[in-house]
Image (cartoon, rainbow, N blue to C red):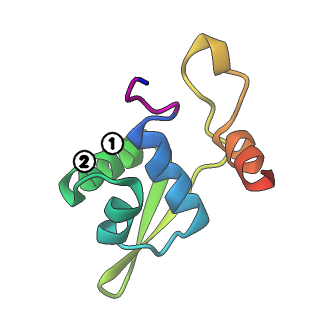
Amino acid sequence: MSNWNFFTNHAHVIFVIAIEPQMTVRDIALKVGITERAVLRIISELAEDKLISIEKSGRSNIYTVNLKYHFRHDIERDCTVGDIIALLKSV
């Protein structure tokens, strides 16, 4: 059996943030199975593309997923992040 995942690490980070917006970078890394440095890079990229926003709360961050964000690829352009998250939550 090959060793690949259906969703990317970027998608996993988005899913984790959507479920638990106050989760720390360390906890996101543990949940996704990647390094904290990788999570920080992914969060930076997602924020740069306006897929998530970051709000400071004391020394912590609160992340908000832009549920109206449309995917970029032609195949899923009609779907939003919120559509996919809703599907996952219903399972």
Mark number for residue 45? Answer: 1
- How far apart, in angstroms, are the residues tagged by discs 1 and 2? 6 Å
- Residue at 36% across / 70% down in the picture? 27
Examine the structure image and report whether residue 5 is included in the region drawn in magenta. yes
Part of the protein shown in magenta: 2-6
| Magenta: main secondary structure | loop
Looking at the rendered image, the quarter that the N terminus falls into is: top left
Question: Which percent across, then down, holds residue 3?
Answer: 37, 29
Question: Which percent across, then down, holds residue 56?
Answer: 38, 76
Residue sitting farthest toward the bottom: 58
Q: Which residue is mark 2?
A: 41
Q: Is 30 in front, or is 45?
A: 30
Q: Is residue 27 above or below residue 3?
A: below
Instruction: Give amino acid for label 2.
Output: Arg
- Residue at 43% across / 35% down in the picture? 8
Circle 2 crowding by C-alpha within 10 Å: few under 14, some 14–19, many from 20: few
Element class at badge 2: helix
- Residue at 46% across / 33% down in the picture? 5
